[in-house]
Image (tube, rainbow, N blue to C red):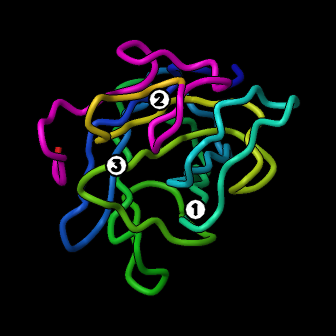
Amino acid sequence: MALGPGSIAFVGFNADGNDGFAFIVIDPIAAGSVIRFSDNEWNGLEIGSGGAFNTGEGGLTWTNGGSELAAGTVVELLNTSSTSTRSVNIGTVSGGTIALGNSDEAIYAFVGTSESAPTTFLTAVTNTNGGFTTATGSGLLGGTGLTAGATALVLPLTDGADVA
């Protein structure tokens, strides 16, 4: 089964000290599957029609191990702001880093050819005050095929969320 929007969902977000996040498997993930994560802002355009991440923040790659992950499995990526101390409870993590902010932050999970080239968005999470928008800002969903409240999580906040 190919991964698509809503195949995973964010269930943890930590922008305090040891940055990290967690996701839960909704649709089984095949052995060896690769999911990429970026905290760069999406420009709001469709993939293949100018859609791209802005640069200057980070991204990393998670690869599942040798067996399928069942629905309900939680994957934790810890210390994502450091390549030397980051860890994951299932699979492996490689590539760059993700340093999370306690406000105006978004993480996008996707399948793609690199940490900056998505082909299919899976989910997103934001702690941007006002949630995801289709205008400008750090929480753009336009062009991703994701929907806030269904396949993308808006953390409830008034002045930013650093742990959820």
Q: Nearer the viewer, residue 113 or 133?
A: 133
Q: Amino acid at mark 1?
A: Leu
Q: Would you say residue 156 sits in the magenta stretch?
A: yes
* Quadrant showing the C terminus: top left
Q: Nearer the viewer, residue 43 or 117?
A: 43
Q: Is residue 32 left or right of residue 152?
A: right
Residue 75 screen position, x and y as percent: 38, 47
Residue at the spot x=38%, y=82% of the render? Answer: 85
Chain part drawn in magenta: 135-163
Circle on res. 48: none
**Residue highlighted by disc 3:** 104
Q: Amino acid at mark 2?
A: Ile
Residue 68 screen position, x and y as percent: 57, 36
Mark 3 neighbour density, 10 Å: few (under 14) some (14–19) many (20 or more): some
Q: Nearer the viewer, residue 110 or 7?
A: 110
Residue 70 vs 22, above or below: the answer is above
- Per the model, the C-alpha gap separating discs 3 and 2 is 22 Å
**Mark closest to the chain's N terminus, 3 or 2:** 2
Residue at the spot x=40%, y=62% of the render? Answer: 88
Circle on res. 60: 1
Marks 1 and 3: in contact by CB < 8 Å? no
Mark 1 neighbour density, 10 Å: few (under 14) some (14–19) many (20 or more): many
* Secondary structure type for disc 2: strand
**Residue highlighted by disc 2:** 8
